[in-house]
Amino acid sequence: MTYTSRQKAALDHSQFLELVETVAGIGYWRLDLVNKHIFWSDEVYKIHDVTPGQYKPGVTDSINFYHKDDRAKVQSAVDHTIETKEPFEFELRLITACGKQKHVFSKGVAETDDNGQIVSIFGIFQDITERVQRERTHLLEQQIHRNFIEQSHDGFWDWYINESYIYISPRFWNMLGYDGKKNGLNPAEIIPYAFNEDYSEARNRLIKHFRSNGEVPFAHELRLYHKDGSIVHALCRGTVVEWDENGRATRMVGTHTDITTQKKLQRHLQDALGFQQLIMDNNPNLIFVKDNQHRIVQANPQFLSLYAEDKRDSIIGTTTLGQYSEHEKATFMRMDKEALETGYSQSIQTINFPNGKCLTYDIQKTRFSDARGDMFILAIGQNVTQREALIDKLSDSNEQLERFAHICSHDLHEPLRMVKSFTEMLEMHLSEVTSVDEKAKRYMDFITNGAKRGQQLITDVLAYSKISKDVRALEEVNICEIISDVKQDLPASACLNYEMPTPIVHANHTQIYQLFQNLISNGVKYQPAGQDAKLSITWKEQDEFWQFCIADNGIGVEPCHQEKIFEVFTRLHRYQAYPGTGVGLSICKNIVERYGGSIWMDSKPEHGSKFYFQLPRASAK
């Protein structure tokens, strides 16, 4: 078969289009305006999701495949080419036979006959959905990036190195107190805003970054001048993102982060740590920290000085337990365990330290946790060697004094008893032999009464000294029983009122009896002449205490003496008027304070007195 030159040209063109369609995925179409017929290539059918032979495209149907909002644009483009013979092209949305939305590109050109009349439109057709989606994704990423830059607390910069042009985001200028500074400028224009020495160091780091092809990171802290004259600390970071064919950096991007607040906090922290270290270094107490494996992780010089000088550098990170006796080691371990389990431990230990010194320390250990939740022990040891030695000495002295008091008690009681006894015998003898005048009787009464007072004074002093030495176990004491026992010794004329039931306290029975007996007997004793005593006992609950009040109708006490009368041997009246040794209220004060309570009075002369005191409740065992 032979072809004309025009046929050969048409054949070559058709073969070319088929090749393009196969390789590039670009379909083609022709609209025959004379016969109102439209031709689609296989790729065009494929894009529309229809099968050649089963579907025959029409002019109107072809336009209806487009999105309803784009159909008018397609019709307008075709009409414009028919009228003007000018080509058209568009990118519009297409709804395929399967209902999928695609983005397509179409371009059409007018074909004319020998008379120049347009007879058809030839065009190409391409599915550009993936490209449009990539572009949209890119635009979205750009928008997100732009929003991030605008909303970020960091200042962003983009430096085109060969062009000596740098973009500076607004946030950078906001950090320096400016509004509306230029976003694009020459890098040299930034130099006046930075400290010279900081800028020089930043330049050196930048050169290292370039020469290492980016392997050495660029990050440097800069001090910048704020508009108001203050200093802004910024962390400048960046990286090269583009290189030329010769390996030279052409573009670099980075950020400026305002770290002024962090620097202030860092300075405050350093000051605090420095102050803490100063306290540790100059504190006379031992201060050290252990982990939950008993290893020393921190210690002050006072603690390290307890070890041999050549061993001090190796103390941190070790337990040091091997340098102590088995007994001392067990004590340390027990205290550590107690502190880790309960949060606190305390003990007084006499320790033979590795430096050869034997010292006594009051050591308190407290548990704490770090930010990761790991447990540690803070230990503080106070040197109480001298204090404990003094306590031991005082204890020995007190024991000697107690023995001395007992000896004196026996030795003094005996001569006073003999004086009293022989005075009474002398009085009886003289009365049998001859008459004794009143003056002699008065003298002998003085002797007898003096002996009685001496005996009572010795008894009261011994009772006072024994209060703190009483080590008998505490028990539940029923106040009703105490009051009943005290009432048996009161004169018949005395009236004592109280309500039932009475409280139960946790104390020593004998001492509580002494307390109530002294206060009640005082209320009976200190009465105006000829007046009968009237007393009342009341109480109320106070946390772990019962607060009691014993009120009387006696002579009362001046306000200026109401604290003084609790001192030992204090008397406000002559012995002839109101006998006593001035020890009773001191005994009451010692008893109450032994149980953690207080005692005080409220009184007015000639209006009676009220004694208040506290005793522990039975539940506070």
Image (tube, helix red, strand yellow):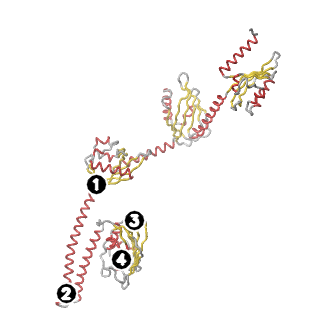
**Crowdedness near tag 3: few (<14), some (14–19) or many (≥20) residues, C-alpha within 10 Å:** few
Mark 1 belongs to which amino acid? Answer: Thr
Q: Are marks 3 and 4 in contact (CB under 8 Å)?
A: no
506 or 37, nearer to the observer? 37
Who's the residue at 28% across and 42% down the image?
309
User: Could you tell whether 8 is left or right of 575 in the image?
Assistant: right
Report the quarter where the N terminus lies: top right
Answer few, some or many: residues within 10 Å of disc 4's Cα (few below 14, many 20 plus, some between 14 and 19).
few
Asked whether disc 1 touches disc 4, contact meaning CB atoms under 8 Å apart, the reply is no
Tell me the tag on residue 385. 1
Residue 484 image label: 4
Mark 1 packing: few (<14 Cα in 10 Å), some, or many (20+)?
some
- Distance CA(mark 3)–CA(mark 2): 59 Å
Residue 528, quarter of the rendered image: bottom left
The residue identified by callout 2 is 428
- Marks 1/3: CA–CA distance: 38 Å
At horizontal 28% and vertical 49% (from top left) the residue drawn is 328
Q: Residue furthest bottom?
A: 435
- Between tags 1 and 4, which lies in front? 4
> What residue sits 76% from the left and 29% below the top?
63
Mark 2 to mark 1 CA distance (whole Å): 64 Å
Q: Amino acid at mark 2?
A: Met
| Alpha carbons under labels 3 and 4: distance apart | 23 Å
> Does residue 116 lie above or below 343 as drawn?
above
| Circle 2 or circle 1, nearest the eye | 2
Position of 467 relative to 208 (above/below): below
User: Which circle's residue, 3 or 2, is located before the other in the chain?
Assistant: 2
Q: Which mark is residue 619?
A: 3
As drawn, the residue found furthest toward the front would be 54
The crowding category of the residue bearing disc 2, from other C-alpha atoms within 10 Å (few below 14, some 14 to 19, many at least 20), is few
